Amino acid sequence: KKDRVEEGPKVYVQENIIYRDYSMGTEYLTEEKFEELKSAALEPGDVVITRAGTVGRTDVFPETARKGIMDSSLIRLKVNQQRVRPEYLAAYISDSPISQFQIESMSHGGTRTNINNQIIKSLKIPLPPLDEQDRIIEIHNVAQKKVEQERETKQRLRELRQGLMQDLLT
């Protein structure tokens, strides 16, 4: 905590991955501490995975995010982009029922589930050709947008219902 400052390289946590929002958070490091912890630095294209509690959520670290490191609640995968698209790998780990089953069956922990690098390394992941991965990413993105639109519609309908119930009761 003594190396935390109000401005500088950012410390990324699980919430950044879960909400896919890299502006969240107020934990920053001094430049000296960042250099010391540079092995935990995130770079654009890294696949980042949540490792504790809400396990197996993934995202690709974006170009637009500020320089920073991951905290211990995250796992980082650096991928050979000649063989696999980071977006494909992130989508497969996070959204494939097969991948989620593998993660759940190998994860451990009592009240809080945990995964580690060994579990991630042991995942069986199909690796289609890059052009097929690109098509899968496109389809996945369209489906994700539709899911998000439906969530927003559901939330608006809940708020409308709540307002109508309030009017009915008054």
Image: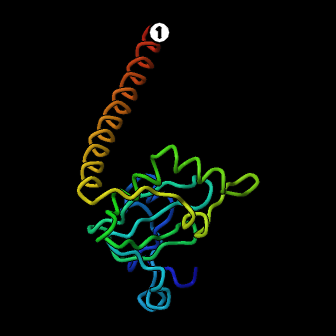
Up/down of 106 relative to 61, above or below: above
Q: Where is residue 131, by image quadrant?
A: bottom left
Quadrant where the N terminus sits is bottom right
- Residue at 59% of width from left, 52% of height from top? 102
Q: Residue furthest right?
A: 110
123 and 32: which one is in front? 123
Q: Where residue 38 appears, x then y in whole percent? A: 45, 86
Look at mark 1 in the image and give the residue it sits on.
170
Q: Helix, strand, or loop for circle 1?
A: loop
Up/down of 79 relative to 136, above or below: below
Is 77 placed left or right of 149 in the picture? Answer: right
Up/down of 114 relative to 78, above or below: above
22 and 99: which one is in front? 99
Is 15 placed left or right of 154 in the picture? Answer: right
61 and 142: which one is in front? 142
Q: Where residue 8 appears, x then y in whole percent? A: 38, 80
- Residue at 48% of width from left, 80% of height from top? 40
The crowd level at tag 1 (other Cα within 10 Å; few <14, some 14-19, many 20+) is: few
- Residue at 53% of width from left, 67% of height from top? 74
Q: Where residue 143 appears, x then y in whole percent? A: 31, 38
- Residue at 41% of width from left, 88% of height from top? 31
Up/down of 64 relative to 136, above or below: below
Q: What's the residue type where badge 1 is placed? A: Thr
Is 142 placed left or right of 19 in the picture? Answer: left
